[in-house]
Amino acid sequence: MHEDDLIYTFAKEYLIRASDLMSLLMPKTLGVGVGVKGLDGRYLLANKAMEALFGQTAEHITHLTDNDLFPSEVATRLQLSDQQIIDGAAAASDELDLSAKGGCKRCLWLKFPMMGPDGEILSIGSVVLDISRQEDVADMRQSLDRLQETNQELQKTLVELDRLASTDKLTGAWNRRRLEETVINEMDRLKRYDHPLSLLIIDIDFFKKINDQHGHVAGDQVLAKLAAVVYSTLRVTDSLTRWGGEEFVVLSPNTTLSTMAMLAERLRERISQAVFPAVKQVTVSVGVAECMAGETWEEWFKRADSALYRAKACGRNQVQLAPETPQRVGVGENVSANFVQLSWHSAYECGNPLIDGQHRALFGHANYLLAALLCGRPSEEVAALIDALMGAVVQHFKDEEAIITAAGFPGSAAHAAIHGELVDRAVVLVDRFHAGTLAVGELFQFLAHDVIARHMLGADREFFPYMQNRR
């Protein structure tokens, strides 16, 4: 049995087993009866003192109900106090006359809920005292106080066991069991309320090389540090799971593909900038997918995993989106499918870190914007993405012009003129977007063909030799 399964099983069964300790907490000389009753009304546990009070052996009491043990008027009163506990009362009590061994005893019957780690009632605890023996009441109260303290400690233990059963020990992230349990609930919310739901898969690039060159201790340190970096970037509603080995999953309720793509790029960038023990720098590849209506968990995860594979195949240290766009229909939405992506490849690098980094980031900006347009996101969200993209383009052009001029590229002036023309066209497109006359196809033509294909992968290559000479 896997260690997590062992802890999980122990946590689920621990409270019922621990209830046997109740009988040990009460000194036998007090004659205090202690029992535990299931929510179906049957006794699960009775100590030896119950024998004298009930006139039955403890073994015989187990599995019986109050109707089996007492006259109807007594059983009815006990059932009413049981219901008080089930309805949420912290305690309930009765004074009852019990007939036992030819005599009659006046008994105080105290009841309290026995709670599970999730706060739900698992069973009803009972303490029964012969109140004709007043000298024992003070001692019983001390025993009850001790019982309450012990029960609180048991609850803390159960909470901790539940945490251990659902957490990866090395990183503190959720384990696979916890994620799959949560996914069921979140996919149900998607089905019932049409709330968007997205995930991303993070894979550490060349992690095997880290283990081979620096040892598994260093590898574990990298995993723990990466989890800490991711945690510092996530929102309150996001969750982090260690899926296995060097793979992590982030689950984000109420999050669309375009928003998840921005989160993925932010995570990729922060991880690449972090300093890791032993290896200094680490990069990751990320696959992103939004859950489609009617999709199974396995199908959804497979699409995200395919996007991750594409990110690694295209050169690593990048984000890729799952190719299908969820066809969710909300108010005023009817989303197109088959999202076309712009994929970065190491062959596009010129050798200057700033230019290459900005080019790669512009690919990401363009993908996010296209995803938002195709998903029918609100105009204010799309406007923010357009402004961010255009701002990044203008800044990139300024930086690139300064770099190629300093490098002695003879066509720098002509190149700057091309930049000016592209910026002018971008301004027109932004104005048309705000006027509501911009088609998705026209925007894609500008980004993918004019800016990416013709300029970044075409005209820019003319200055590549000047950058490569300065590596």
Image (cartoon, grey):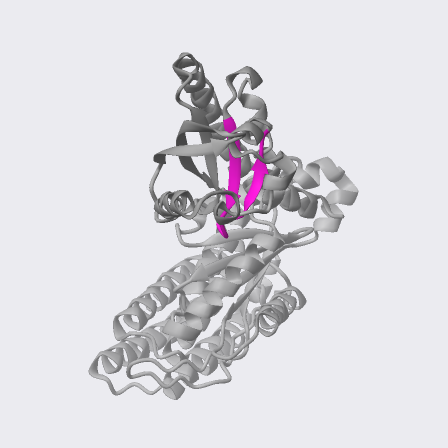
Q: Position of residue 323 (x, y in %)?
A: 54, 78
Q: Is residue 470 visible?
A: no
Position of 276 with respect to 416 (left or right) is: right
Front residue of this view, candidates 99 and 90? 99
Residue 363 on image: x %, y %: 48, 69
Residue 321 versus residue 218 in the image, above or below: below
Task: Answer with left or right where residue 1 lies relative to residue 308.
Answer: right
Query: Could you say which quadrant of the image residue 62 lies in?
Result: top right
Question: Can you name the residue that lies furthest to the top here?
Answer: 135
Tell me: 19 left or right of 107. right
In the image, 431 versus 11, the foreground residue is 11
Q: What residue is shown at x 66% (from left), y 51% (from top)?
A: 246
Locate residue 128, reporting x and y percent: 45, 29
Left or right of residue 278, residue 66 in this image = left
Q: Is residue 196 magenta?
A: no
Res 438 quadrant in image? bottom left
Give coordinates of residue 371: x percent, y percent: 43, 75
Residue at 40% from the left image edge and 51% from the top image edge:
235
Residue occupying the far front of the picture: 102
Q: Is residue 293 visible?
A: yes
Q: Nearer the viewer, residue 317 or 243?
A: 243
The residue depicted at 42 percent of the width and 76 percent of the height is 370
Which region is colored magenta? 33-47
Magenta portion: prevailing SS class: strand
